[in-house]
Amino acid sequence: MNERPAQPAPTRPRTPPVRRPGSALYSELTRDLRDRIDRGEFPPGARLPSENELAQTYGVNRLTVRRALSELAQTNAIRTEHGVGSFVREPSVRHRVDDGHAGLAESMAARGLTVTHELVSAETLTRDDLDEDTRSRIPDGWRGPLTRFRFRRLLEGIPWSLSTAVMPADLVPAGGWDATGSLPALLADHGTPVVRAERGFSAAPAGDEDARWLDVAPGTPVLVIKGLNTDQDGDPVMFLHHHTRADRAEYVIQPSRKR
């Protein structure tokens, strides 16, 4: 797994923020920290100094520091993991799911960005082995053996989602999937072009497994995305279930206009 920088950015003594007329001290501290982030002193993913270190550096009390960090978190400049620290947020990436591409890897490749996959597990099972929610979402016609892949996707080396794909076993090429490319690309290479179909979006707190694979704290909000992909004739070929880092992804859909 890719690990975030383990050490906070170095600190140096700073002049306490000058309070402007009518401005609270924590607001001035917030402004100074935001300026330092914008200048790249604290780059994306970097851990900020602790509350104690910031209080000593700026010559203010911890309550002032805590309020300033809270303000930064509310504006999505940083994210705070309890018991770990505060980190500068990596920039979110807009992802249009109606852009005509078969999957995330293809969408991002068109923008010059790289998606890599890490296979967590691959297994053959029956419909009865699936949880009730998945059974209710896959086509009734999928009665034979099914293949379930679990995998992690990384965008530019940073975790994006922990994902599951369920599909009829007879659609999986004989060599299986080694995660060197996307599943849609694998199927297309074997004569089954894949098209995005329906997608549903919700939210949930990250469980322990999500936290481990997505490099976030347990309880951090994640986007839950479920839906089907079809072949070029509209027949379902794959059910997908993604737990996506909410701080990394902004999904965009352009509603169709009826004329």
Image (cartoon, rainbow, N blue to C red):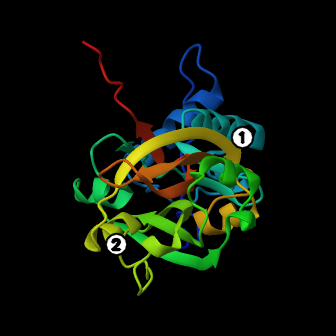
Q: Are marks 1 and 2 in contact (CB under 8 Å)?
A: no
Image coordinates of residue 166 in percent, x first then y, are 56, 64
Q: Is residue 63 visible?
A: yes
Q: Is residue 182 left or right of residue 133?
A: left
Mark 1 vs mark 2, foreground winner is: 2
Q: Quadrant of residue 62?
A: top right
Q: Is residue 225 left or right of residue 172?
A: right
Mark 1–mark 2 distance (CA, rounded to whole Å) = 49 Å
Q: Which residue is mark 1?
A: 66
Image coordinates of residue 77 in percent, x first then y, are 52, 41
Q: Is residue 1 visible?
A: no
Type of the residue with mark 2: Leu
- Tell me: residue 23, above or below residue 89: above
Assess disc 2: are there few (<14), some (14-19) or many (≥20) residues with their C-alpha within 10 Å of its C-alpha: many
Type of the residue with mark 1: Arg
Towards the viewer: 39 or 55: 39
Towards the viewer: 56 or 196: 196
User: Residue visible at 71% across and 66% down?
Assistant: 209
What label does residue 186 carry, if any?
2
User: Residue visible at 68% across and 54% down?
Assistant: 135
At numbered mark 2, what does the secondary structure look like: helix, strand or loop? helix
At numbered mark 1, what does the secondary structure look like: helix, strand or loop? helix
In which quadrant is the C terminus drawn?
top left
Image coordinates of residue 111 in percent, x first then y, are 23, 53
- Tell me: residue 67, above or below residue 239: above
Assess disc 1: are there few (<14), some (14-19) or many (≥20) residues with their C-alpha within 10 Å of its C-alpha: some
Towards the viewer: 218 or 167: 167
- Tell me: residue 238, above or below residue 180: above
